[in-house]
Image (cartoon, grey):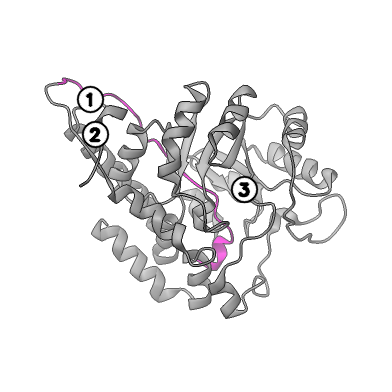
Amino acid sequence: MNPLLADLHEKARAVLDPVHYDFFAGGVGDEVVLAENEAAFRRLALLPRVLRGDVRDFGFPVLISPTAFHRLAHPEGEIATARALNGTVLVSSMASTVPIADVVAAATGPVWFQLYVQPDAEVTEALVRRAEQAGCAALVITVDSPVFGRHRRDIAHGFHDLPSGLAAENMRDLGTPGLRKIEMAAFSWDDVERICSLTSLPLWLKGVLHPSDARLAAERGLGIFVSNHGGRQLDLVPAALDALPAVVEAVAGRIPVVLDGGVRSGGDVALALALGASAVGIGRPVLWGLAADGSAGVRTVLDVLRDEFEHVLAMCGGDLTRDMVVVRC
């Protein structure tokens, strides 16, 4: 790991309440897939091309994935994260500790809204309207959470709710006064299509791993995040990177595909793009930057990844294609 990012992680660990550090860092079950998300990148290498001339312009194909409760990491919470964007997309969690309108107002880049479909359809619609009115540029529906994941670290700590004074602010005053709890529930393609009918915002599905589900999303023109929820939902699933090639093949370029899970360097970004991702999402590195140094820490994370990615791209001949990816012996 880049020394700057490693230093931010260690500073974050030092300043965070250990219970809150474990909430951010931990995963489901034995945390097998949590480790595999990162290890999958280490199993691959890139065969550079040479004498290729100009470097292809990929821009900065990184966005900030939704993570909950930023005020556990920093007093300004999601406001501090939003100020650091400098053009990068922030997918703001439905479980934000700052209302989405305030996140958008502070943002220096586009903000998308992450949505858990709620059992009460009126509550879901109210959340969609709230995101629209705030000025969000897209909706990201998380689809891999019919129930809450079982996090042994949180169970051991007895951490089941936010400290006094903090709340999931987007769940306040949804049709009726007061604060609602976020509920997980099983839902279907009919629910997704109903949400499509409610809004003109672009829709993405986050948590797709099976190629058949990816095809169904492509048939509906929905972007997808290949993601296992950062190893926080089911410990039996593959690493997100390992699931990516089959999903990319299934959608055959019809929709954009974001890879989310285990990205820790600009080299990881390059590997994901070579395997067919349109972009990658990062989660925990942003939280470590936020806890360590607020907006400046988040900006450092983004700057490091940008610099590393551009360097790798130049060293690989300016392009990233599937035939350049090989397995390390």
Considering the numbered disc 3 on the image, is that residue within a helix, a strand or a loop?
A: loop
Considering the numbered disc 2 on the image, is that residue within a helix, a strand or a loop?
A: helix
**Label 3 is placed on what type of residue?**
Asp
Q: Earlier in the sequence, mark 1 or mark 2?
A: 1
Q: Which residue is at 86% across, 58% downward?
A: 177
Q: In the depicted view, which residue is nearer to us: 93 or 240?
A: 240
Position of 108 with respect to 308 (left or right) is right
Q: In the depicted view, which residue is nearer to us: 226 or 66?
A: 226
Q: Is 274 one of the magenta-colored residues?
A: no
- Asked if marks 1 and 2 touch (Cβ < 8 Å), the reply is yes
Q: Which of marks 2 and 3 is nearer the N terminus?
A: 3
Q: Separation of disc 1 and disc 2 at Cα?
A: 7 Å
Q: Is residue 276 visible?
A: yes
Q: Tell me if mark 2 has few (under 14), some (14-19) or many (20+) residues whose alpha carbon lies within 10 angstroms of its own.
A: many
Residue that numbered label 3 is attached to: 144
Mark 1 or 3: in front is 3
Q: Which corner quadrant of the image does residue 233 belong to?
A: bottom right
Q: Residue furthest left?
A: 51
- Asked if marks 1 and 3 touch (Cβ < 8 Å), the reply is no
**Label 2 is placed on what type of residue?**
Leu
Q: Which residue lies furthest to the right in this view?
A: 176
What range is drawn magenta here? 52-73
Q: Where is residue 23 in the image (x, y as percent from the top left)?
A: 53, 68
Q: Tell me if mark 1 has few (under 14), some (14-19) or many (20+) residues whose alpha carbon lies within 10 angstroms of its own.
A: some
Q: Separation of disc 1 and disc 3 at Cα?
A: 37 Å
Q: Which of marks 1 and 3 is nearer the N terminus?
A: 1
Instruction: State the mark number for residue 71.
Output: none
Position of 310 with respect to 285 (left or right) is left
Residue that numbered label 2 is attached to: 313
Residue that numbered label 1 is attached to: 55
Q: Which residue is at 58% across, 42% downward?
A: 206
